[in-house]
Amino acid sequence: MLFDLRGRGRRRTVQFIYLGLALLMGGGLVLFGVGGATSGGLFDAFSSNNNTNTSTSYTKQIKAEEKRVTVNPKDAAAWAKLASLRLAEGSSRGGFDGKPSGLAEFRQASAAWEKYTALNPPKYDLNVARQMVNLYGTTGLNEPDKAVAVLDVIVEQSPPDVSLYQQYAQLAYVAGQNRKGDLAAAKAVALSPKAQRPQVKAALASIKQQVAQAAAQGAAAAAQGAGASTATPAPTSTAAPATTTTPKK
C-alpha cells in the first residue's frame, strides 16, 4: 500500500493529490476518458462521489446471489454479480468516503471478486472489472496494486485504447509499479494521434514525477511522526530531600 489512509484527514488529502494529478492531463484526455472507447479515467478511479448519493439497498439481491454461490461455488457469473452488488451496497453506505459500514461491504466485494477470478473464467465480465478498478482506488480500499491486476485483465480483453493505457499508467505509478507504468505510458503515446503525442507523453511523465514526490513526502512525514512518537522524554531531575541538623545543646 503506497499511502496509509487510516489517519484523520489523510484520505481526503490523498484524494485531492490525485485529482490534482488528473487535472495535469488537460483537455479531458484522461479526466473523462475522451479519445477512446473506455469510459472514465483517473477521475472515475479515484472519485469519492461514485454512487454515494443513492439510498438504494441491495440486501435482497445480495442474499439471492449468496444462495447461488452456496449451492454452486463454481458459478462464476454469480460471484461476479455478488462482487458488483457488494460494491454498490458499500458505495451507498459511504464506502468511498471512508465510512466503516461501506468499507466492510467493499471488503466483501473484493472477496467475491477473488472467488470469481480463482475460477479462471474464459472471458471476464469487463463491466464488473471496471467497477473493481474503482473499488481498489485510493478512495475505496486503497489497494492500487490490485487495481493494476484488474487492469491487466481489461487490457488483455479490450481493443487498444489510449485512455485505457493512460489510466493503467497512472495507477501503476500510484502502486509503485514504475516498469508497468512506463510500458503503459509508451503504449498510450503510441496510440495517440501524432499531434497529441508530445502532450500525452509530457503529462504522464509529470504524473509519474508528482506521484514520486507525493510518496517521498508521505514517507518523510510518516518517519517524522514515528520518530516523534518513539522519542524518549528527557529525564526529569528530582531534588534531593532536604536534611535537617539538630543543634547540639
Image: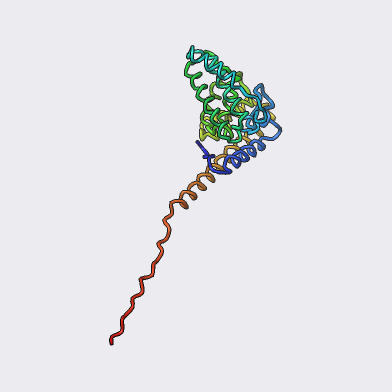
Quadrant where the image shows the C terminus: bottom left
Which of the 4 image quadrants contains residue 188?
top right
Where is residue 178 drawn, in percent x and y? 52, 34
Q: List the single residue furthest toward the left.
A: 249
Which of the 4 image quadrants contains residue 209?
top right
Q: List the single residue furthest toward the front.
A: 249
Q: List the single residue furthest toward the bottom.
A: 249
Q: Nearer the viewer, residue 94 or 132?
A: 94
Q: Nearer the viewer, residue 43 or 207?
A: 43
Q: Is residue 163 visible?
A: yes
Q: Nearer the viewer, residue 140 or 62?
A: 62
Q: Which residue: 46% across, 51% down?
A: 229
Where is residue 89 drawn, in percent x and y? 60, 26
Colour scheme shown = rainbow
Q: Which residue: 69% across, 30% down?
A: 195
How many marks are shown on the rendered structure? 0
Q: Is residue 206 visible?
A: no
Vertically, is 14 above or below 87? Answer: below
Q: List the single residue furthest toward the right.
A: 27
Q: Which residue: 64% across, 35% down?
A: 22
Where is residue 234 drawn, in percent x and y? 42, 61
Where is residue 72 drawn, in percent x and y? 49, 12
